[in-house]
């Protein structure tokens, strides 16, 4: 098997959030490890005193934007088939078509069956791990920060008059791979109401008319706080913001639209130096009431901890010093955090009419393919080892040890070394929650099945994979 050709990328040097200078080389299949002695001694803190004028910062980053976006777009096109191919007769809750098919590209001449027959060591030594299975970098990994899709930016600008546009980078994944917008809202105490969003994006300007009479005053106040913008690393009043004009900040529900998600991305705040940080997908808040761990990799123990952590720490890339400068919002636990948690814990999964009270398929309602897929899910596919009904989670963290399959490599200024422990996401309503995995690297359910078939070594047949996708769409 010939080795996969490396891709020559442009060399870009930039400040890593004021901490260090990182020079990108290439997404080469040969390893590019960072020596441990070079990792020691790098500052954990961002630069607080910015001496460069805002006008100069904006001009410099605006000029660099086309090159950075081309580099990232080239990476996406090399990894994936990004065409718009909706599945026939399969939609999300409010009617958006679901994308179908495996979109991760294989090395030349390889098939999924041949790849799955190889050992992790063979795949690693011959550089055959599909590039779409590598960790996915942030659109501008050296810079990081909140990046919102255009449709959310447009809606918030129209409804609330705030502008969440960044002058240095735009969101990267095509709209057709993202969750529908605005998403439906289902409330655990009032399943009889169905979708209570009325097809609208809930914001500060309409939440009262939509929810007055449905929520208690305490829950209404919690929702108001979830919709209220507070200073954030890229959206604030300082000269090192990434918005053209001084900003009020970002709100919890700017990322978690209608208590779900819109594809908005960020970098996990927990790791240093910058190139080792992981891209993170905005997790859906649906079904928070049954969850016992919060955050895709942080394993926070309560939704109150999660809510407070996000605004005090994650909003500012984990730097409490810079948070003080930019205007951190110290939420009060008893009268604010608890109220916000109350509303989040009301957010329900979408209906699944083919499931019984145990979360299993009702044979009188399910198709033959869905029933076969359920058998694969609980049997040969080993999915139920972690994703247990009725909500299809075990509320634990698991390390997939993906580093077995590839050598450490620098990808667009992100060091790919493996993923570490990842929360077991609930699979109820999974078809409404693309893209998949904690960093959005898997664009479709078919991609997800191929990924786990390889990682877990289950050696599913093409028919078993197809049936498993049919079952997942029914959850």
Image: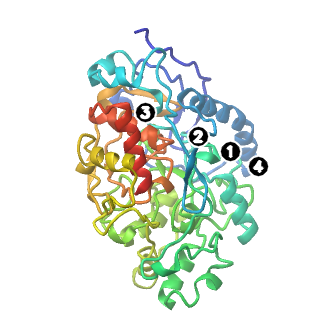
Q: Earlier in the sequence, mark 1 or mark 2?
A: 2
Rounded to the nearest angstrom, the CA distance separating label 1 from label 3 is 27 Å
Quote the CA–CA distance across marks 2 and 3: 19 Å
Q: Secondary structure at mark 3?
A: helix
In the picture shown, does residue 263 fall above or below 259?
above
Residue 95, given in percent of the width and then of the height, sits at 61, 59
Q: Quadrant of the N terminus?
A: top left
* Vertical position of residue 242 compared to residue 38: above or below: below
Q: Is residue 451 visible?
A: no
Compare marks 1 and 3 and give the one earlier in the sequence: 3
Residue tagged by mark 3? Answer: 133
Neighbor class of circle 4 (other Cα within 10 Å; few <14, some 14-19, many 20+) is few
> Which callout, 1 or 4, points to the residue nearer the camera?
1
- Distance between mark 4 and mark 2 Cα atoms: 20 Å
User: Picture coordinates of residue 66 (x, y %)?
Assistant: 72, 35
Q: Earlier in the sequence, mark 2 or mark 3?
A: 3
Where is residue 138? Give x, y as percent. 54, 42
Q: Nearer the viewer, residue 294 or 113?
A: 113
Q: Which residue is mark 4?
A: 55
The label nearer to you, 4 versus 2, is 2
Please report contact status of discs 1 and 2: CB closer than 8 Å, yes or no: yes
**Which numbered mark, 2 or 3, is in the foreground of this view?**
3
- Which residue is at the far front? 364
């Amino acid at each position: 098997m010939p080795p996969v050709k490396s891709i020559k990328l442009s060399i870009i040097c930039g400040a890593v959030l004021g901490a260090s200078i990182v020079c990108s080389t290439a997404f080469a299949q040969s390893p590019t490890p960072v020596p441990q002695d070079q990792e020691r001694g790098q500052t954990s803190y961002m630069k607080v005193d910015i001496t460069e004028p805002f006008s100069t910062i904006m001009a410099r980053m605006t000029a660099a934007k086309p090159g950075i976006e081309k580099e990232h777009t080239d990476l996406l096109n090399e990894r994936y088939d990004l065409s718009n191919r909706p599945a026939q007769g399969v939609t999300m809750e409010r009617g958006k078509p679901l994308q179908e098919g495996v979109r991760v590209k294989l090395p030349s001449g390889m098939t999924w069956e041949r790849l799955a027959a190889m050992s992790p060591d063979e795949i690693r030594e011959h550089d055959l791990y599909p590039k779409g299975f590598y960790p996915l970098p942030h659109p501008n990994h050296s810079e990081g920060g909140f990046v919102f899709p255009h449709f959310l930016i447009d809606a918030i600008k129209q409804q609330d008059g705030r502008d969440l546009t960044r002058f240095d980078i735009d969101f990267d994944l095509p709209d057709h791979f993202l969750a529908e917008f605005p998403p439906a809202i289902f409330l655990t105490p009032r399943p009889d109401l169905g979708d209570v969003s009325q097809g609208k994006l809930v914001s500060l300007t309409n939440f009262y008319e939509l929810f007055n009479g449905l929520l208690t005053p305490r829950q209404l106040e919690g929702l108001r706080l979830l919709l209220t913008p507070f200073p954030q690393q890229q959206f604030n009043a300082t000269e090192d913001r990434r918005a053209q004009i001084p900003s009020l900040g970002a709100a919890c529900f700017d990322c978690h639209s209608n208590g779900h998600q819109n594809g908005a991305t960020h970098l996990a705040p927990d790791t240093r130096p910058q190139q080792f940080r992981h891209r993170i997908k905005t997790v859906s808040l649906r079904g928070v009431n049954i969850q016992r761990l919060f955050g895709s990799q942080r394993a926070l123990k309560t939704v109150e901890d999660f809510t407070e952590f996000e605004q005090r720490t994650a909003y500012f890339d984990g730097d409490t010093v810079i948070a003080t400068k930019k205007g951190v919002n110290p939420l009060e636990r008893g009268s604010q955090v608890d109220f916000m948690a109350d509303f989040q814990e009301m957010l329900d999964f979408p209906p699944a009419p083919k499931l019984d009270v145990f979360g299993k398929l009702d044979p009188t309602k399910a198709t033959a393919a869905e029933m076969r897929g359920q058998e694969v899910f609980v049997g040969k596919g080993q999915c139920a080892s972690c994703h247990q009904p009725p909500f299809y989670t075990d509320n634990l963290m698991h390390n997939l040890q993906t580093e077995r399959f590839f050598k450490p490599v620098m990808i667009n200024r992100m060091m790919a070394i493996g993923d570490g422990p990842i929360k077991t996401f609930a699979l109820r309503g999974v078809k409404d929650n693309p893209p998949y995995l904690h960093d959005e690297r898997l664009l479709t359910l078919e991609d997800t099945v191929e990924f786990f078939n390889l990682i877990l070594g289950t050696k599913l047949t093409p028919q078993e994979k197809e049936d498993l996708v049919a079952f997942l769409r029914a959850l």
